[in-house]
């Protein structure tokens, strides 16, 4: 792991001032550019520029162009005495450093690779050529970024730690298409300002700007109040658009020694809007895909301890329903089968499996269900 001071020095020397692509921008020009980028991203992300495909494309192109021109602020790290307030955290006694190497990259993504909706037994509305769009994903690599050890995925790799551990996450911006800085911002864990992973304009800390071709190492603490399942996502200059393109994932923190479920699944309810997919409508997705047969098919056996961790990954509220099943609510008192979750909120459905068969799981907001947010859950006999 690189020392934080070395990362700070590299960041300070890489881009000593606000700069545009190929020409300098003064601070006022940068702030105007940043405001333009934020405006376009906000409009695109909320769907208010989705009625006219050409207008949407222009808005997204403007946001991407603006984000590509953003350079590292001059004072990315404050006075060294200030940095001394934020030492890199170490594992607690009995804990360990859990290391991950993750690259952010873009690629062409097909949201319905089977071409069919198995629930309705019908083809999805678009042919493959029109289904493809450019996504932005986090991909897991072996130590030192030697080679990829998992396929590109939406969501990105799930990070695991126990209370007392640190998560040491090496992030590389490997993108060559969007040409934008990215970050990784966590929820649920403890971190110092240097490891926040957020772009704050002139107040940006060292972990808040990873330019194309650069790497940064985040260190986060798994404290007792971190127990649970949490999202992480891009929080760089173009964070809204790039998160909706696929730069998100999950963190699972457990109490030390607690038994893991026999079957444990991360389920992201999110969408690809027109600003991302190029479609003339919103695609309501589960883990990067739309419609049963494309979305994940989960499996379990009777008698197994099963946990579904469901995260809301867009601006909508969702409900999570599994046919033929019910479980204790978050308070552990009442039973439920259709709990509600909001943007970047997590709920967990945990139960002992006792009902074999093919079941559907889906969002019970009917418009989301019918626009692709459905999948299969198959339970085999013991």
Image: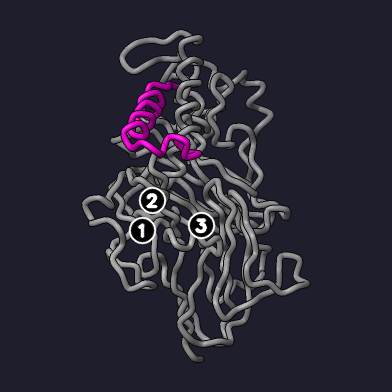
Residue at the spot x=72%, y=55% of the render?
Answer: 224
Q: Is residue 285 left or right of residue 124?
A: right
Tag of residue 269? 3
Which of disc 3 and disc 1 is earlier in sequence? 1
User: Magenta residues, as a range?
Assistant: 44-71
Which of disc 2 and disc 1 is earlier in sequence? 2
According to the picture, the residue beneath numbered tag 2 turns out to be 139
Image-quadrant location for residue 347? bottom right
In this view of the protein, can residue 183 be seen by the observer? no
Residue 177 counted in the magenta span: no
According to the picture, the residue beneath numbered tag 1 turns out to be 150
- Which SS class for mark 3? strand
- Note whether 10 is above or below 95 in the view shown: above
Residue at the spot x=50%, y=39% of the render?
Answer: 46
Residue at the spot x=55%, y=64% of the render?
Answer: 364
The image position of residue 285, as x and y in percent, is 44, 57
């Amino acid at each position: 792991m690189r020392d934080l001071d070395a990362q700070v020095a590299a960041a300070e020397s890489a881009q000593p001032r606000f700069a545009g692509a190929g020409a300098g921008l003064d601070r006022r020009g940068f702030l105007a550019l940043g405001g333009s980028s934020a405006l376009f991203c906000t409009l695109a992300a909320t769907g208010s520029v989705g009625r006219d495909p050409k207008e949407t494309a222009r808005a997204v192109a403007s946001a991407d162009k603006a984000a590509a021109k953003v350079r590292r602020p001059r004072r990315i790290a404050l006075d060294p005495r200030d940095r001394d307030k934020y030492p890199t955290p170490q594992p607690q006694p009995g804990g360990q450093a859990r290391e991950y190497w993750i690259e952010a990259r873009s690629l062409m993504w097909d949201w319905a690779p089977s071409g069919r909706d198995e629930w309705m037994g019908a083809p999805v509305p678009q042919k493959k050529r029109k289904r493809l769009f450019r996504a932005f994903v986090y991909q897991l690599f072996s130590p030192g970024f030697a080679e990829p050890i998992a396929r590109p995925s939406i969501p990105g790799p799930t990070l695991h730690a126990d209370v007392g551990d640190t998560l040491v996450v090496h992030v590389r911006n490997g993108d060559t298409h969007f040409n934008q800085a990215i970050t990784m911002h966590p929820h649920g864990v403890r971190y110092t300002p240097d490891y926040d992973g957020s772009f704050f304009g002139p107040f940006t800390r060292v972990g808040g700007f990873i330019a194309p071709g650069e790497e940064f190492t985040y260190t986060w603490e798994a404290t007792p109040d971190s127990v649970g399942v949490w999202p992480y996502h891009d929080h760089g200059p173009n964070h809204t658009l790039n998160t909706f393109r696929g730069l998100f994932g999950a963190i699972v923190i457990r109490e030390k020694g607690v038994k893991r479920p026999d079957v444990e699944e991360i389920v992201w309810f999110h969408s690809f809007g027109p600003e991302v997919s190029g479609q003339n409508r919103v695609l309501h997705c589960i883990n990067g895909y739309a419609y049963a047969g494309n979305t994940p098919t989960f499996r379990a056996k009777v008698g197994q301890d099963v946990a579904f961790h469901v995260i809301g990954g867009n601006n909508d509220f969702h409900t999570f329903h599994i046919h033929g099943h019910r479980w204790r609510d978050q308070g552990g008192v009442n039973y439920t089968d259709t709990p509600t979750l909001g943007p970047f909120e997590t709920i967990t459905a945990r139960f002992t499996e006792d009902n074999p068969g093919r079941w559907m799981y889906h969002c019970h907001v009917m418009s989301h269900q019918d626009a692709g947010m459905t999948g299969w859950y198959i339970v085999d006999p013991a």
